[in-house]
Amino acid sequence: MRLPEPGEEIPRLVKEPVGKLQLLHYAGASGDDNLVHTDVETARSVGLPSVIAHGMLSMGFLGQLLTDYAGAGSVRGIEVRFRRMVHLGDRLTCRGVVREVRGADGGHLVALRVWAENDGGEQVTEGDAEIWLGF
Amino acid sequence: MEIDRTLIGRASRVELHEVERGAIRRFAEAIGDREPLHLSGEIAPPTFPTTFHGELPGLALDKKRILHAGEEYRYHRPIRAGDALQVVWRVDDVYEKEGSLGRMTFIVIASEGRDGLGLLVYRSRSTLIYR
């Protein structure tokens, strides 16, 4: 691995389409028991066609984008806004573009713009992140 | 209940969260993460603090009315299996804003986790919309 340059895009992460089983597992693992994510009846009662993904799941995908690139424990910060709902069957592509690289703590801090987009090219979740590379 | 600026500064009790390998592993698997150190349960993925829950006295929100608008994590070091984290939550801000859906109430909840020595491990900020 080498030091990235500002403007450079890191390798994209294309996730499997969001399925009911993943939402059940995420609800259990995260402790977010809001039924709008796991129960179709509840989702319909608030005007949704079916269950929607936890916003935090899409942020988890962005975390994976970063640790796939820089390894476990490399993330110093991540901040996102949830812009659009993620529906059942949506396939998200996670992307990151380097904004700034500077020396710090005997390595380099890399600031990135990160986002998850659906197949329609809409950014569902977007924000900023900072990773530390130990070289 | 009334959600207004008098809630700012309200804090939870300090909750002890012992980080278990199995919990890290299940969380990584649910995301579909392939990182070996996450799947072995050794190091927690960056959004792991979302698994910690605490109660803010006087802030009983109806879940159906909450929209999650944003989330932030800042780390001093990664969370690892075996960490015993003391976590506290605090209402950092409450404000009203005119949005596409009319007037909305925003609630910002800040949190921090410290290790057994009292050293800061992470800080987080959640922005919620209450409709």
Image (cartoon, coloured by chain):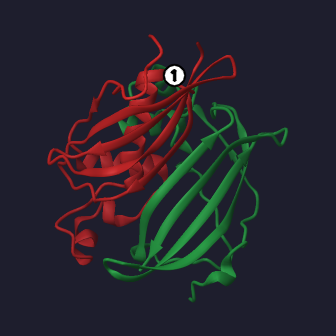
Chain colours: A red, B green
Say above or below: A87 vs B77. below
Q: Residue at x 47, y 22 (%)?
A: A70
Q: Nearer the viewer, residue A129 or A26?
A: A129
Which chain is disc 1 placed on?
A: B
Residue A132: x, y in percent? 57, 25
Q: Residue at x 54, y 50 (%)?
A: B72
Residue B105, can we see it?
A: yes
Q: Quadrant of residue B109?
A: bottom right
Task: Tell me which amino acid carries mark 1.
Answer: Leu
For the N terminus of chain A, the quadrant is top left
10 Å crowding of disc 1: few (<14), some (14-19), many (20+): some
The image quadrant of residue A61 is top left
The answer to whether residue B30 is visible is no
Location of the C terminus of chain A by quadrant is: top right
Q: How many marks?
A: 1
Farthest residue to the bottom: give it: B2
Give percent across and percent down for residue A120.
14, 48
| Depicted A85 relative to depicted A13: above or below | below
| Percent of width and height locating residue B39 | 46, 26
Q: In the visual, does A49 lie left or right of B56?
A: left
Q: Is residue A15 left or right of residue A99?
A: left
Foreground: B126 or B54? B126
Query: Which residue carries the number 1 mark?
Result: B37
Tell me the SS state at disc 1. helix
